[in-house]
Image: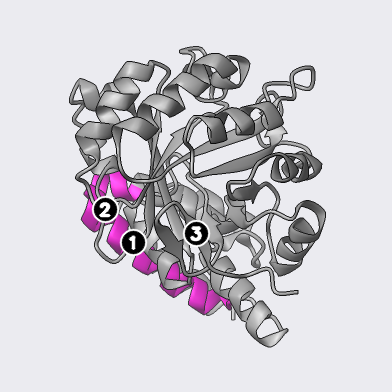
Amino acid sequence: MNSIQKLQIGNVTLENNLILAPMAGVTDLPFRLLCKEQGAGLLCMEMVSAKAILYKNKNTEELLTIDPRENPVSLQLFGSDPDIMGEIAKQIEERPFDILDINMGCPVPKVVNNGDGSALMKNPLLAGKIIEKVASAIEKPVTVKIRKGFDDEHVNAVEMAHIAQESGAAAVAVHGRTREQYYSGKADWDIIRQVKEAVSIPVIGNGDILKAEDVIAMKEQTGCDGFMIGRGAQGNPWIFSQILSYFKTGTYPEKPGFQEVTEMLLRHAKMQLAFKGEYTGIREIRKHAAWYTSGYKNSSKLRGRINEVESYEQLEALFREVASYNM
């Protein structure tokens, strides 16, 4: 059974159903372009605060930037005021994104303490109002990203998915962990199955997809329509091409050698610095560099040195040096 197929979300057709998850501080423009090259069917942007757009916060412009090579791309908003969410959705609809996603899954305390993100799992009524306002404000399809529940005592993904569907959402993505779990422990795929059985809109499964076998297993266990890859893509944009290749040929391409990883990282760094300037760019590429090299020889020793690089030249020199004894 081939789990990889086209996926229809509202009036948007994805060439395949492998989706790059929205990750704050990770799925910025340069990284999304790399994942696109590797075959991701949909790219999700970092979440943007509706209030920040409302108050014209200068940092949001960078978060909203889309490259024509990216589409289809999903822009993710978070907020808990239905009127503001609807208003901002309408205000930004002209921008070149294809799908608007509402974040109801972010576990970070400052987001949750504001009543946003996964805090909305505790308030299904308000969640429904937000989805309805946004869906009726714009023509583009609206999707919702939820978790299993807020904690183990309040597992309500099925109820939330129902509300999303009734309120006009075109699809729902379900992360099989509660807010209290953050990203720890094992994702519960059974909750994804329950959601899939409860609604008729497409259901996208999220949590612990690291290789093609995980896609097959999630498809068998849940019947979900799409697969959202988050941490499995960190330092590993190849995950998309590897999974696609597996379903085409039945075999895995080899894990990229250190030389290929180095080339990808340095390209990523160049794009990052061009997009964000040297100061921010080099600091942000450090965590990516640690992810890229994880699992290769001497990677823990290398990590300490990565955190000291202050320029592209230093990063390149470090990796050229390391590559020579990592062959």
State left or right for residue 151 relative to residue 314: right
Q: Which is the main secondary structure of the residues drawn in magenta? A: helix
Q: Are marks 2 and 1 in contact (CB under 8 Å)?
A: yes
Residue type marked 2:
Ile
Residue 71: mark in rendering: 1
Which residue sits at x=46%, y=13%? 114
Label 2 vs 3, first from the N-terminus = 3
Q: Does the magenta-highlighted stretch encompass residue 275? A: yes
- Image coords of residue 261 (percent x, y): 51, 71
Residue 8: mark in rendering: 3
The span shown in magenta is: 256-282
State left or right for residue 170 relative to residue 57: right
Label 2 vs 1, first from the N-terminus = 2
Which residue sits at x=54%, y=54%? 234
Image quarter (top left, top right, bottom left or bottom right) of the N terminus: bottom right
Label 3 vs 1, first from the N-terminus = 3
Q: Residues within 10 Å of mark 1 (few under 14, many from 20)?
A: some
Q: Does the magenta-highlighted stretch encompass residue 131? A: no
Quick one: which residue is furthest to the bottom in this view?
Answer: 249
| Gap between marks 2 and 1 measured at Cα | 8 Å
